[in-house]
Image (cartoon, grey):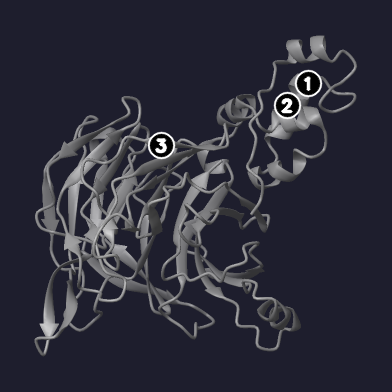
Amino acid sequence: MPPPLTSYSFTSGAEFHTQNPTLTLIPGLPDDLATLILAFLPFSHHGRLKSICKSWKQFFSSRTLRSIRHKHIPLLKRSHILCIFPQDPSISSPYLFDPQNLAWCYLPPMPCNPHVYGLCNFTSVSHDSRLYVLGGSLFDTRSFPLDRPSPSSAAFRYDFVTQSWDSLPPMLSPRGSFACAAIPNTDRILVAGGGSRHTMFGAAGSRMSSVEMYDIRRNEWVALDGLPRFRAGCVGFMVGNVDEEKEFWVMGGYGESRTILGVFPVDEYYRDAVVMQLKNGGVGKWRELGDMWEEGERRQLGRIAIVEDINGGSPGIFMLDKNDIFRYDMASNHWWKETSVPKRAADESSMGFTALNSELHVMVLYNGADSAENRRLRRNKRSASIFLQIYHPQKKTWRTLITKPPFQQPLDFKTAVMCTIRL
């Protein structure tokens, strides 16, 4: 495992010259200009650039860098990076992947609780260049029976300036497999529904309808009106950037369960969505939408990706259903087929799906049966390459990328937790 990262503080230009009268960030350039040039370099390269010299290490670990990027680089122009949690984040490092530069970098593991293991079904969300990890299902050595997971109320935050994890106040209700979204242009995060379930028996475990909001400035959780009914395994996202038009959408998920032949439990999946309108910085009531597809079209909601509208309008809402991509139409409350993945995946249940830089990324492990490199990786028990098929909704075009992740363990997109962040 990589050594823990260390934080440094960068001095201002005047202090820098006083302490180092003959040393500059870039020889021949004033430090004010040098800091501006270095600040525009992609975030994924910062880790390697720290090894150039001591002054660069100080600068790329400072709050000065963050303030310059926030001042001179618009939000939608900053590096849009994918954060992947391959396994339990308390024992395995999460990683950042920059698809534009095909660059990977690691983050330190979360603070570990010695009584807890196997954290899964948690949610990760980004806000203001910080990464939040909330809730999840875990196994606790102090609970009984040991094979039944318990919902977690734990909350953690990773600060990319201090390069460290902080423990936050726990949620009011422990939950895993829940909807979550950060409210744009505010310091608040919403969570809704969830529960905890057995990893082997899908219909076992709890369901809940409670909703709460984390106020980042006050560092506290506040209870809100609950969902109209129990809903776990759901997806949450925000629609709208203007205060009067912001809405928190919760789609899909499962509630009650039934048994087959009175023995085998199965989930009853929802085909609808519920929406909460956020007015003037406050919260409103829930409204229910009808079914988004007909009986027999599909069993459950697929993987969802949200493409931001650079003009501030409604985002594009897309779903990956096996090897097909559908677009959600709000006017008709229906999913319409957008396109199909050019190269079909052998295992349709293990496909990653996310939106980066206004493009949809479909990710699968690269089979590479005829690839000598992948045969060598398999012999060494290293993770295989990731094959990305990237679709641009506006241009209606596809392109492909192949990247080799740095982590050793194999990546399972069925259980891996992913989110995006702009840095």
CA distance separating discs 1 and 3: 36 Å
- For residue 396, say whether it is visible: no
Residue pointed to by mark 3 = 167
| Residue 35, disc | 2
Q: Are marks 3 and 2 in contact (CB under 8 Å)?
A: no
Kindly check if marks 2 and 1 are in contact, taking CB atoms under 8 A apart as contact. yes
The image shows residue 257, relative to residue 65, as above or below, that is below
> Circle 2 — which element?
helix
115 or 38, nearer to the observer: 115
Which comes sooner in the sequence, label 3 or label 2?
2
Mark 1 vs mark 3: which is more N-terminal? 1
| Left or right: residue 386 compared with residue 348 | right
- Please say whether residue 88 is visible from this viewpoint: yes
Query: What residue is shown at x 13% (from left), y 59% (from top)?
Result: 230
Identify which residue, 392 or 322, lies in the foreground.
Answer: 322
Estimate the x, y position of residue 92 in percent, counting from the top left: 53, 56
Residue 217 in picture, x, y percent from top left: 35, 25
Q: Nearer the viewer, residue 419 or 284?
A: 419
Residue type highlighted by circle 1: Asp
Query: Element at badge 1?
Result: helix
Above or below, 106 against 21 in this view is below
Residue 341: x and y, percent? Answer: 48, 77
Q: Secondary structure at mark 3?
A: strand
Q: Is residue 19 left or right of residue 113?
A: right
Tag 2: amino acid: Thr
Q: Write down the quadrant of residue 68 in the picture.
A: top right
Residue at label 1? 31
Image quadrant in which the C terminus is located: top right
Q: Give the crowd class for mark 1: few <14, some 14-19, many >=20 residues within 10 Å.
A: some
Mark 1 vs mark 3: give the one in front.
3
